[in-house]
Image (cartoon, rainbow, N blue to C red):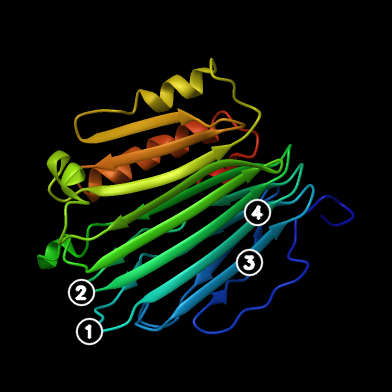
Amino acid sequence: MDAIGRSYLSRQSFNAPFHLSKSYWDGRTLTVQMINPTAGILSGDRLCSDVKVEPGGRLSLTTPSATRVYTMPEGRAEAVQNFSVAGGARLSFVPSMLVPHRHSRYHQASRLTVERGGELLYLDTLAPGRVAHGESFQYTELKYELELYWDGHLNARECYHLRPGDDSLIPVRRLFPHAYWISGYLITEQLTDSHPAIAAIRELHCAEAFVGLSRLPYAGWSIKIIARDSCALNRTLASLRYILSHVLQFAAGFSRT
């Protein structure tokens, strides 16, 4: 933070296919968009992100539109993400959804580190493909790996490997033939298990969107959403943002239109 309490980018470096937008300070949170100026993600691309929020910093990191993973006759694309949140710092990372095209392969590995007193909202959103083009679950392979550390403790670890050609997607497709998916984490000490916001998030569960909220062993919650279609997903995500923005003091960092 600067001398009058504003968050700012103290150091930045990027190269193709990444571009960082001009940052915007709204009085409480610094908003930065990560932009891919190319057509999308292609075979052989390796995207690496390393973001650190220092004590007192307030950062909302977003993307302006969906990320497309294009058809890959061979090879794959990879993304490696490292996010570090210091004590007293706040980070919201809510990118637009990933849209895998027919015969695409994409691997993503994320490491999230939050110090005691730090706060984080992290949401990954995944489309089944270009549904309007008849490409629902026509990609070849998606692999997501994530480790979340809080105060030096392993707080969550997940790995899912999705291949439409095997049985990995059967449970999801039984719920919704064109299921959209959100996997995320909310780390904050402002909410207790008995807080009305926790009950409100669980009440988002309905026939068109299955919503799960699970307490993590050390701090925070795991959030999972499986929605019938993109409209149901967007409605549920908007409701989630509304709940969080009216409870948490850093509302601007936890809301996105």
Which residue type does callout 2 highlight? His
* Identity, as a three-letter code, of the amino acid under mark 4: Leu
Residue hosting label 1: 73
> Helix, strand, or loop for circle 3?
strand
Residue occupying the point 33% across, 40% down: 225
Q: CA distance from mark 1 to mark 2?
A: 7 Å
Q: Is residue 113 above or below residue 221?
A: below
User: Who comes first in sequence, dot 1 or dot 4?
Assistant: 4
Q: Is residue 167 visible?
A: yes
Determine whether the residue tagged by mark 2 lies in a helix, strand or loop. Answer: loop
Instruction: Name the quarter where the N terminus is drawn.
Output: bottom right
Amino acid found under the numbered disc labelled 1: Pro
Front position in the image: 44 or 188: 44
Q: CA distance from mark 1 to mark 4?
A: 38 Å
* Circles 1 and 2 in contact, beta carbons < 8 Å: yes
Q: Dot 2 surroundings within 10 Å: few (below 14), some, or many (20 or more)?
A: some
Can you identify the residue that label 4 sits on?
59
Above or below, 37 against 96 in this view is: below
Q: Nearer the viewer, residue 94 or 22?
A: 94
Q: Using a 10 Å C-alpha cutoff, classify the residue at mark 3 as few (fewer than 14 neighbours), some (14 to 19) or many (20 or more).
A: few
